[in-house]
Amino acid sequence: MAGKVQKKREELRILLINIAEARIIDGGISQIRARDLAKDAGCAVGAIYNVFGDLNELVMAVNGRTFKRLGDHVMGTVKSHPDSTSAETLVIMGHAYLDFASKNAPAWRTLFDLEMSSDHDVPEWYMSEMRALLALIAKPLAEVFPDMEAEDVALMTRGLFSSIHGIVLLGLERRISAVPEDQLKHMISLVLNNLTKSAQKK
């Protein structure tokens, strides 16, 4: 009996993640409402909270899938340029990030729109997904700056990610401080090429 209950619980969990993912891909985090999810899943609202502690936890499960899709897209793009230098790889990654964000805007924004309060512990698996994404950047960055301490490479990786993310975010949301969307790719190239040139001058 316990096995059947657990199986049904897991089936509902996967169903809810699938439904939430489809809603987020379509319209972002604003599409995640308990009543709508329950209706789509054919279950009671209370059943959602028997599987997930709250809706944040459900969104994190969807974000876990999005992190993987983003990482796969970036690495797939890098692998399609096997002869690129480490400096060129950083530019390729920046362009791939822009490409993923522009083609998957609602899901991409949800990665960063999820509110985390001080009393809401972020699960280790979620932090691990974020670290894995940053590790993709850290490898070529460390090769560009071989004399840099590991701790500084980690900080620079976060700074570089924040810089490219900011360019993409402001550009795609058409903020007043942004460059036109058709210039975003060139702007990313300028920022990253000038950064790597500074390493070559040393």
Image: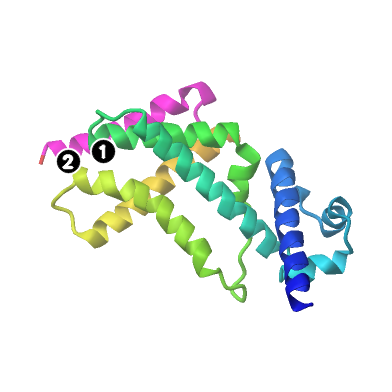
Q: Identify the mark at residue 199; answer none if there is no mark.
A: 2
- Toward the left, the furthest residue is 202
190 lies above or below 49: above
Q: Classify the position of the C terminus by image quarter.
A: top left
Of helix, strand and loop, which mostly describes the magenta segment? helix
The residue sitting at 46% across, 44% down in the picture is 71
Residue 66, percent across and down?
A: 57, 47
Q: How is the image coloured?
A: rainbow
Residue 150 at least partly seen:
yes
Indicate the quadrant where residue 190 lies: top left
The residue carrying pointer 2 sits among few (fewer than 14), some (14 to 19) or many (20 or more) residues within 10 Å by Cα, namely few
Quadrant in which the N terminus appears: bottom right
Seen at 73% across and 41% down, the residue is 27
What SS does tag 1 mark?
helix
Front residue of 11/126: it is: 11
Could you say whether the residue bearing mark 2 is in a helix, strand or loop? helix
User: Which residue is under mark 1?
Assistant: 195
Is the residue under label 2 in contact with that under label 1 (CB below 8 Å)? yes
Residues shaded magenta: 177-201
What's the residue type where badge 2 is placed?
Ala
Q: Is residue 182 above or below residue 62?
A: above
Residue 161: image x %, image y %?
A: 40, 47
Q: Which mark is residue 107?
A: none
**Residue drawn 46% across and 56% down?**
130
Q: Position of residue 120 (x, y in %)?
A: 62, 73
Q: Is residue 153 left or right of residue 147?
A: right
* Residue 174 visible within the image: no
**Quadrant hosting residue 9:** bottom right
Give percent across and percent down for residue 16.
75, 56
